[in-house]
Image (tube, grey):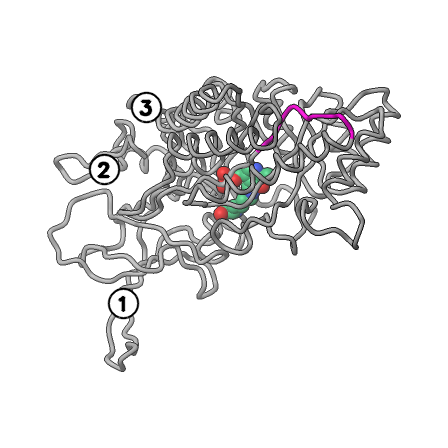
Amino acid sequence: SSGVRRGNDGAVEVAGVGVAELAADHGTPSYVLDEADFRARARAYRTAFEAAFAAVGTGVDVYYAGKALLTMAVARWAREEGLRVDTASGGELAVALRAGVPGEAIGLHGNNKSDAEIAHAFDHGVGRIIVDSLAEIDRVADLAAERGVVAPVMVRVTTGVHAGGHEYISTAHEDQKFGLSVNVAAGPGTDSPAMAALLRILERPSLRLLGIHSHIGSQILDPDGFEAAARAVLELRAELATRTGVLVGEVDLGGGYGIAYLPGEVALDPERVAQDIASSVAEAAANLGTPLPRFSIEPGRAIVGPAGMTLYTVGTVKPVTVGGDDGEPFTRLYVSVDGGMSDNIRPALYGADYHAEVVGRSSVAEPVLARVVGKHCESGDIVVHQVMLPGDVRAGDLLAVAATGAYGRSMASNYNMLPRPPVVGVRDGASRVLVRRETEDDLLRLDQG
Ligand code: LLP
């Protein structure tokens, strides 16, 4: 995070709190979250998009995607910075509501929402339910009619734009479970699934069609995909208007704004991407002869990813000599830490790369090729595939992995019965537990004996 500094003694501090103090007060492993950095990124996205869209004559709402990391404090920070909250399940919705986020400032996603989740959304006046299939449209409409409410809905569409990192997090191509295609119809002369969904919503008096939603993927570092998807959505909107006279008021462009994970990598710049999208939608709308809708976006990773790091303690250090590609053997230092794939599944799941540093002290030792691994019972339990660490790295050293704020704690597990680490917030030289560390009692709490 931008609050990270290395002091004269070689020890790192985050927002004015030294890592030794963090480790002593909260133990390791811990997720450390820099509150000021989170707030600054939330603000940067909101102000960049507001300015760019105001310049082309429309407005924008920024929803923080809670799936990246949702705690009550985080939801409140997002809210205080003028963001709304995007939730993807009844559980995320419950956290946002408990944090005091008003229902109208919350969106509810999900390709397989339960009736209970939908009812929960109605009860709290959730501002928008993003529907993802024809079957769900009927279900939401029926549930709303039974309760005598009118449900505000958006339709999630797929535009065929390929963007983003790993296949598992790329969502706009057609052969996956999300969304309704704007391109591929079931047969000649039939409507696209996206158009069919919009028409179906307009037939149901218990639904109010707010607009169209497109999320193309995650960890995207090139603005082109957002622009192409936005154009496709505006075309669909214009086509619906031609056919029905209904010009929907809002278009959501989803999340996916990429961040830097490694030194030297460059994150997507919010100002640049906002301006690129705004000018491209303005041009597209003018070509289509339609006024611009209001927009919304749903960044998660870009707000919370760089604001978080994971603090570990080094345990076993083991040199392993392996055959090189050219046949020459080389030695890689396996540095084990007190967590692993249970607190960060991303390297194992997506082959994601991270950067690690020894943060509790300085070292003049020659750097050596190292691999940071966890303490789980499988060889794929890798935290950092490849990193240069000081050759004197040893048990007891504090090691930090950067940019773990997004999809670390939120995807954490209790594999091998490891307690999940706490989320520690730091701000102005003080730390505070936002989510406490699990205990052995927590691990046994659900076990009925
Ligand atoms: N909106 C929708 C509808 C989404 O599906 C997602 C992410 C977001 C917003 C937020 O995307 P972001 O700005 O954080 O990229 N677990 C994966 C990422 C999965 C993202 C799923 N949807 C990872 O660790 O990379």
The region drawn magenta spans 244-252
Which element carries disc 3, helix, strand or loop? strand
In the image, the residue with mark 2 has its CB under 8 Å from the nearest atom of ligand 1:
no
Quadrant housing residue 86: top right
Disc on the earlier residue, 3 or 2: 2
Q: Residue at x 44, y 31 (%)?
A: 274
- Along the line of sight, the residue nearer the viewer: 287 or 263: 287
Above or below residue 381? Residue 115 is above
Three-letter amino acid code at disc 1?
Answer: Arg
Quadrant housing residue 155: top right
Three-letter amino acid code at disc 2?
Answer: Val
Q: Position of residue 307 (x, y in %)?
A: 37, 34
Which element carries disc 1, helix, strand or loop? strand
Q: Can residue 438 be seen in this view?
A: no
Q: Quadrant of the N terminus?
A: top left
In the picture, measured across the screen, residue 116 lies left or right of residue 292, that is right
Disc on the earlier residue, 1 or 2: 2
Residue at image mark 3: 430
Residue at image mark 1: 332
Q: Position of residue 5 (x, y in %)?
A: 22, 34
Q: Position of residue 426 (x, y in %)?
A: 35, 27
Disc on the earlier residue, 3 or 1: 1
Above or below residue 98? Residue 136 is below
Residue at image mark 2: 12
Q: Residue at x 61, y 32 (%)?
A: 288
Q: Does the magenta stretch include residue 248?
A: yes
- Along the line of sight, the residue nearer the viewer: 113 or 208: 208
Give the CA distance from mark 3 to mark 1: 37 Å
Q: Nearer the viewer, mark 3 or mark 1?
A: 1
Give the CA distance from mark 3 to mark 2: 15 Å
Q: Position of residue 277 (x, y in %)?
A: 47, 33
In the picture, measured across the screen, residue 259 lies left or right of residue 104, that is left
